């Protein structure tokens, strides 16, 4: 049985995918309803997609879809994980297989065709300042999970800290920095995630701070100089 208090899980990302997905399951148990049968796509869904594409999906992408690919509350409240069917219909972009998209279509992310046979290939953004953003699909999945859950937390707050950037620079002394890439979408970089007791924090471009708290008690434990500056929305995205 999990403890009632959420504590950092991603301060050191495991080297193997199985352990990474286990952390994902533990995280979801804390921040959402536990993953249940039917939350993932079926093998038949994936195999149909692969027949239409003419090749197998990378193992990590298959696992992502199979474990909980249907859970829009986990992956698609802000940006969006494509469905397997969309991989065939819309998923080609300059020799990449696109599987994730920004909510207004300003950016998309995918795997290079030349990497498609790798088990856990790198992920690239393809529109604005194209480049590799993650060394692996599994790390990218965790990054998107944390971002989406911050935006959908029971207590969600955000604010521009341009004039108080020293407060953001000090977050690492108060919270656990997640072992995740700093790249995602060019307008957000560097993108950093932090974990604390029942709380998640995300910074964009060393300027914007987003906070997701599991409850009002965790929210109130934020340093007053941060708490007092945030614009809070309780439950709007939950």
Image (spheres, rainbow, N blue to C red):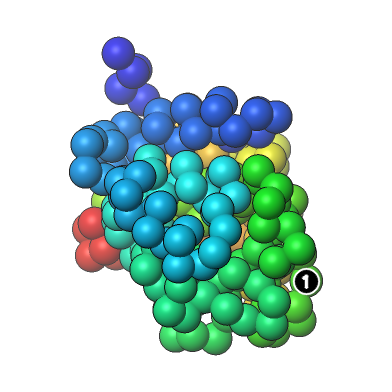
Using the rendered view, name the quadrant where residue 234 is placed: bottom left
Q: Quadrant of the N terminus?
A: top left
> From where the camera sits, is residue 111 visible?
yes
> From where the camera sits, is residue 231 visible?
no
Q: Can you give x and y, in whole percent of width and height, for residue 213 in the image?
A: 37, 46
Task: In this rendered view, identify the residue nearer to me: 33 or 202.
Answer: 33
Task: In this rendered view, identify the residue nearer to me: 109 or 225.
Answer: 109
Q: Residue at x 23, y 36 (%)?
A: 36
Q: Residue at x 32, y 49 (%)?
A: 44
Q: Can you give x and y, in whole percent of width and height, for residue 188 in the image?
A: 64, 71
Using the rendered view, name the quadrant where residue 34 is placed: top left
Q: Can you give x and y, in whole percent of width and height, for residue 199 in the image?
A: 44, 41
Task: In this rendered view, identify the residue nearer to me: 229 or 2.
Answer: 2
Q: Crowding at label 1, few (<14), some or many (≥20) Cα neighbours within 10 Å?
A: some
Q: Quadrant of the C terminus?
A: bottom left
Residue to which mark 1 is pinned? 131
For this view, does 41 lie left or right of residue 106? Answer: left
Relative height, residue 17 to residue 193 (above, below): above
For this view, does 140 lie left or right of residue 64? Answer: right
Q: Residue at x 55, y 53 (%)?
A: 56
For this view, does 31 lie left or right of residue 24? Answer: left
């Amino acid at each position: 049985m999990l403890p009632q208090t959420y504590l950092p899980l991603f301060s050191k990302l495991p080297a193997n995918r199985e352990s990474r997905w286990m952390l994902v399951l533990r995280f979801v148990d804390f921040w959402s309803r536990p993953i249940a049968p039917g939350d993932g796509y079926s093998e038949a869904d994936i195999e149909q997609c692969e027949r239409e594409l003419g090749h197998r999906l990378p193992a990590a992408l298959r696992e992502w879809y199979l474990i909980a690919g249907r859970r829009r509350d986990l992956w698609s409240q802000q940006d969006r994980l494509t469905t397997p069917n969309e991989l065939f219909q819309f998923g080609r972009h300059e020799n990449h297989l696109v599987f994730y998209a920004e909510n207004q279509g300003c950016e998309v992310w995918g795997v290079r065709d030349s990497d498609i046979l790798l088990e856990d290939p790198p992920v690239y953004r393809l529109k604005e300042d194209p480049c590799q953003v993650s060394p692996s699909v599994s790390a990218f999945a965790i990054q998107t999970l944390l971002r989406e859950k911050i935006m959908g937390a029971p207590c969600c707050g955000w604010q521009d800290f341009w004039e108080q950037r020293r407060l953001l620079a000090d977050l690492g002394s108060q919270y656990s920095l997640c072992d995740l890439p700093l790249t995602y979408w060019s307008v957000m970089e560097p993108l950093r995630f932090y974990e604390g007791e029942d709380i998640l924090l995300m910074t964009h471009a060393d300027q914007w701070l987003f906070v997701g708290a599991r409850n009002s008690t965790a929210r109130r434990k934020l340093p007053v100089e941060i708490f007092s500056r945030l614009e809070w929305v309780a439950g709007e995205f939950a």
